[in-house]
Amino acid sequence: MHLYTYDSAPNPRRLGLFLAYKGIDLPTTQIDMRENKHRDAEFLAINPLGTLPALMTDEGVMLTEVIAICDYLDALYPDKPLMGSTALERALVISWDHRIFVSIFEAFAEMLRNRSPAFENRALPGPLDIEQIPELETRGRKRFRGSLELFDTELGDKPFLCGDSITFADIDLLVGVETARWVKESIPEGCDNLQAWLERSRAALS
Ligand SMILES: N[C@@H](CCC(=O)N[C@@H](CS)C(=O)NCC(=O)O)C(=O)O
């Protein structure tokens, strides 16, 4: 197995926290995204999507989606499960995770990538040239804040998103919330359940 990643980027960090919690150590190559190394022909020959992280399995299959990599590794390394231990728990983790990806990570990308000259013609991650739509920045902020307010209500007084123990869904929301600093967003005022959850999740992962 071989992991290609860039530790400080948000999607690689989702996987990095998963690996650290489970104590999994993989042979790894860092691809410097600040230097645009993920768009070099050399890396595109490995992962034609040009996205990170990417895991090459021992069978020579390339996995490019963090949720799939985590699900695969949780099955291979069952100690300290993060993807749920029953069929229902697993469904809940995937359900939360999908919602977090769509409503938090995509909202973040809308805010980050639709104005900055650094992302000109690269408004979406990946190999396609996609023009910016500046209005999406405002929509991203609305999606981000509104989704967190909904999550706050749904979380209520549960310790973690899926119940009593931390799962990959909590890791994803934590990375989504912490990365939002880049676009000057955070947990909205009054979301006290989420604020307490964030402290609990940080402690569980440390
Ligand atoms: N769908 C992928 C997303 C991976 C992704 O978008 N990673 C970002 C880094 S945070 C990336 O590679 N961006 C490449 C680009 O901006 O062209 C997943 O769920 O893992």
Image (tube, rainbow, N blue to C red):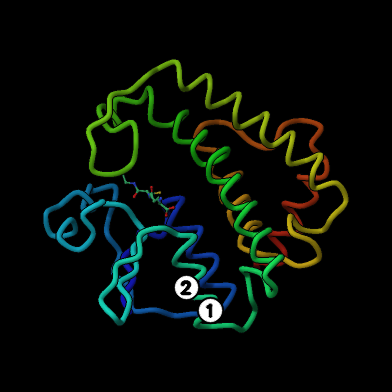
Q: Quadrant of residue 132?
A: top left
Query: Looking at the picture, which amino acid does disc 2 mark?
Result: Tyr
Query: Residue drawn 68% across and 58% down?
Result: 92
Q: Secondary structure at mark 2?
A: helix
Q: Are marks 1 and 2 in contact (CB under 8 Å)?
A: yes
Residue 186 placement, left or right of 37:
right
Q: Residue furthest front?
A: 87
Q: Is residue 149 above or below residue 18?
A: above
Q: Secondary structure at mark 1?
A: helix
Q: Residue furthest right?
A: 157
Give the residue at mark 1. 75
Which numbered disc covers residue 49?
none
Q: Position of residue 197 (x, y in %)?
A: 77, 52
Badge count: 2
Give the residue at mark 2. 72
> Between residues 32 and 120, which one lies in front from this camera angle?
120
Query: Looking at the picture, which amino acid does disc 1 mark?
Result: Ala
Q: Position of residue 204 (x, y in %)?
A: 71, 67
> Between residues 185 and 149, which one lies in front from this camera angle?
149
- Give the quadrant of the N terminus: bottom left
Q: Quadrant of residue 4?
A: bottom left
Residue 22 placement, left or right of 135:
right
Q: Position of residue 160 (x, y in %)?
A: 76, 58
- Give the quadrant of the C terminus: bottom right
Q: Is residue 117 above or below residue 39?
A: above
Q: Position of residue 13 (x, y in %)?
A: 48, 58
Query: Residue drawn 23% across and 48% down?
Result: 35
* Distance from Cα at disc 1 to Cα at disc 2: 5 Å
Query: Residue drawn 29% across and 72% down?
Result: 61
Query: Residue drawn 25% across and 28% down?
Result: 121
